[in-house]
Image (tube, helix red, strand yellow):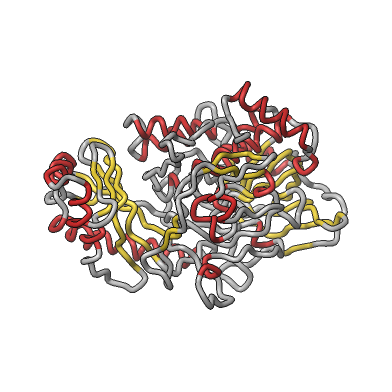
Amino acid sequence: MTVALVILLLAAQPAAGQQWLIEPPYGPPAKMNISQQGKPGGAAAPAQNKPDSDSCPDPCTAYDVIVIGSEIEGVLLARAAHDHGKKMLILDPRSRPGGQLIQGQMLVLDEPRDKQHRSLVQGRIKRLYDGYNNRKIRKIEEFEKFYHNLLGPVPIRSGIRITACKTVRKGDVRSLKYIEYRARDGRIHRVTADYWVENTDHAALTGLLKLKRIPGTESLFKGGGPEPEYMAATYMLRFKNVNWAALHDATLKDYPLTNLAKKYGPNTYVDWDFGTGFSFVTEKYEPSSDRLKLRGLNMTYQRDGRVIINALLIFDVDPSDPKSVREAVELGRNEAPDILEFLRGNLPGFGRAKLDELPDYLYIREFDRYETLYVPTRDDLMSSRMFPDNVSIGGYAIDVQATRRIPNGIGLGKPDRYGIPLRSFLLKEIDNVIVAGKNAGAAADAYGSVRILPNTALAGEVIGILIGREEKKLRDLDASDLRRIHDDLEKHYGIRVRG
């Protein structure tokens, strides 16, 4: 361990039971001072890619696994590997940990279910969904508590920027040998790992490695051009003083659901916890910018008159560019008062509503993803295909959210349950880089379903267990290993992924 790192460790003020290397989990509110590296030619200088190479020279700190980014899917991987004795480090380009769940306040959870309406949520993430469904985890403070309890003893360093990375050639593939990063205090550190995990929403690591990109949403359109196109980001909206009972009662008066659909729009529904639809209402809203769209409402009642809504779409956001993110957040924040006035006048129960505290980040649905050993397709999902190396059982409609070219989005089918293989999380061109969460390998016509949190959260946890328990490298696991692994997952963790 270098002298500089020892000094940092001694200077840190960890929260009880947690090993924070730079700052405690709840620092002063960030004002979008996000220290992220940009793409080549972007707002920040790109890292240097050094492909020719030897072993990592001194001074260099070695880890079993280094996770880049603090999205919850990679945190699940990190915690599982840590619990099995692996030396872990999370390096987070953002100023505070939490990713889209905490900083973006994406607190409206979608739950995948099969055609028999059975929940497909498994693993540690099920504790979050159970709390969400039984009204114990609805408010941001409750989500924060869950997140930081999950992170627990895993060390994390926030506010870093990758400044260099070195790969070495190994036959037909490369290995990532080490990276250098600038810490918040300005010091440069060099680290090496057996495995690296891309766990950001802006390809902070993989975007630097000169990889082949999986064609994105643009490939779904007839005559789609070479320019990438991404599903819109969302700025989450929070309200207080909402009379949820009045909204619920108003929709009950218009039952059955067919009448609700005629009056308010398709899929309109409100119970005591959740509300959806109302697209006939929101289509009347005129935003202040053509970069904004108020789509149909996806609402969660958080208790005590508080409601959070996933509905305000923002186009043309580049999550790898801090300036683009800041501009989008400001755009959403400035639009929120106008949306409040609109809902007050057009939605039952919102007549006396007020804005609650708004997030300082976005919900990013999609960005550059890179080829994995296997890239699932729509046919795989719709045929309920299972794989011998399953690490998750997924589900959910193939929901392609709005883009510039398809402002209302498109649906590509509702699969039953399907398998997601380990190979979809292993980069094709680099043998020791794992992708987590929305970085998962999936074709554009499957990605609208694969990307959903519980699908990739389970995969992250399972992969962390494999790293912790298996002596073989992930790529070397054979059919007999995988049969044993599936048995062990079911027996010891209550996780069934064999299909």
Label total for image: 0
Question: Image check: 307 left or right of 162?
Answer: left
In the rendered image, the quadrant that contains the C terminus is top right
Please state the horizontal and vertical placement of residue 224, each as a whole percent of the image.
54, 75
In this view of the protein, which residue sits in the foreground, 44 or 11? 44
In this view of the protein, which residue sits in the foreground, 164 or 292? 292
416 up-or-down from 31: above or below: above
Q: Quadrant of residue 482?
A: top right
In this view of the protein, which residue sits in the foreground, 265 or 47? 265
Please state the horizontal and vertical placement of residue 468, each as a whole percent of the image.
70, 31
In the current view of this chain or complex, which residue is farthest to the front?
383
230 up-or-down from 150: above or below: below
Which residue shows up at 78% across the image and 57% down it? 166
The answer to whether one can see residue 21 in this image is no
Please state the horizontal and vertical placement of residue 293, each as a whole percent of the image.
32, 66
Please state the horizontal and vertical placement of residue 251, each as a whole percent of the image.
16, 46
Question: Image check: 241 left or right of 141?
Answer: left
Which residue shows up at 59% across the image and 42% down it? 419
225 up-or-down from 100: above or below: below
In this view of the protein, which residue sits in the foreground, 111 or 152? 111
The answer to whether one can see residue 487 in this image is yes
210 up-or-down from 240: above or below: below
Which residue shows up at 82% across the image and 47% down it? 58
In the rendered image, the quadrant that contains the N terminus is top right
Which residue shows up at 27% across the image and 45% down it? 275
Q: Quadrant of residue 393?
A: top right
